[in-house]
Amino acid sequence: MPELGLGAAVDLAIEHAMVQDDKVILLGEDVPMLRAPLFARFGPNRVMAAPISESAFLGAAVGAAMAGLRPVVELYMVDFVAVAFDAVLNHLAKIEAFSGGEWTAPVVIRAPSGGGYGDGGQHGQSLWGSLASIPGLSVVVASTPADAYGLMSTALAHDGPVIFMEPKLLSDEWLEFLGRGGRTTVTFDVPEDGRYGEVPEPPQSVDLGRAVVRRTGDDVTVVSVAVGVHRALEAASHLEDDGVGCEVIDLRSLRPLDATTLIESVGKTGRLVVVDEDYREFGLSGELAAVCLEAGLAPAFGRVCVEETQPFARHLEDAVLPNVERITKAITSVMNTC
């Protein structure tokens, strides 16, 4: 099995799709530079630079998809989806429903997401909870290179719009380009198991709405995505020495959501801790709690989320984001409640 970086695995999935289907195109700001190998192979008619206007090129992608193409739209970071939110909320998400299925919009939005690299609160957000709340969209988040390939491959074959969230902290490319900027004095707390990993040969797709259990345990269910999965696994490893068995679930897909895996695990453990780099209020953590309650479960519940605007200062940012210390404390608190 070859070992790839997370970003390289995403690129490989796009390359394979472009080889197999000439309707797949790529567009976004600086894309010929960012995806130089794809530009060299497929040329400017399929790898297209866009002006600095997300509303323009994402809106154009909606029309291109309705005309039969399968656009992959690159954003520098998911925060910039706010600039083009009308195209996402009122067009991409609603075309199929409003047309009675006559029209579809197979657009993949590649959206680097998350913080931990010192770029501030308007550049380091996750926002998957807000996006996953919109009917008509699929939202996926990768935490390993194998899943990055698998989820992107599935997104490219899907006939509806998919938001593909790419954790910047796990991508060498984005970390260097957006965070380090060539400085040798800057360091980041990057989980190595997410940064590089084996990708099966041939690579495998990952179904939408299918979570994976990264670690089994009987005492508490810990659920997360992206970087949070690796922080949760580290906390679980520490707590094992205290006799606490954590079952760690990587959702991978937020919409559709694998409620079955969640309910089965929480039904076994009776405890749930959600680790979420997105905002606490009205987000993923509350949704998962509601899913369990609606299934007739009443677990002891805790959550580790972003509770304020992310600061620029790295040490302050690390304190605001879910970290191993906060996760360990939340799990311990839940264990002590029942």
Image (cartoon, rainbow, N blue to C red):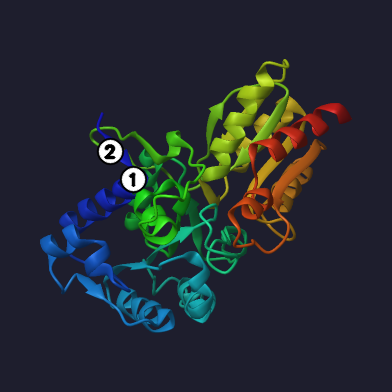
Quarter of the rendering occupied by the N terminus:
top left
Front residue (pair 305, 178): 178
Helix, strand or loop at mark 2: loop
Front residue (pair 172, 81): 172
Q: Which residue is mark 2?
A: 203
On the picture, is 193 further left or further right than 65? right
Provide residue 129's location: percent of width, then percent of height.
62, 59
Q: Quadrant of residue 130?
A: bottom right
In the image, is residue 228 above or below residue 11? Answer: above
Provide residue 308's location: percent of width, then percent of height.
72, 61
Q: Which residue is mark 1?
A: 149
The structure residue drawn at horizontal position 48% and vertical position 37%, both measured from the top left corner, is 191
* Residue farthest along the front direction in this orientation: 185
On the picture, is 331 further left or further right than 74? right
Amino acid type at mark 2: Pro
Q: Residues within 10 Å of mark 1 (few under 14, many from 20)?
A: many
In the image, is residue 153 above or below residue 261? Answer: below
The structure residue drawn at horizontal position 54% and vertical position 52%, both measured from the top left corner, is 116
Amino acid type at mark 1: Tyr
The structure residue drawn at horizontal position 33% and vertical position 57%, both measured from the top left corner, is 156
Q: Quadrant of residue 56?
A: bottom left
Asked whether disc 1 touches disc 2, contact meaning CB atoms under 8 Å apart, the reply is: yes
Q: Quadrant of residue 63?
A: bottom left
Provide residue 165's location: percent of width, then percent of height.
46, 56
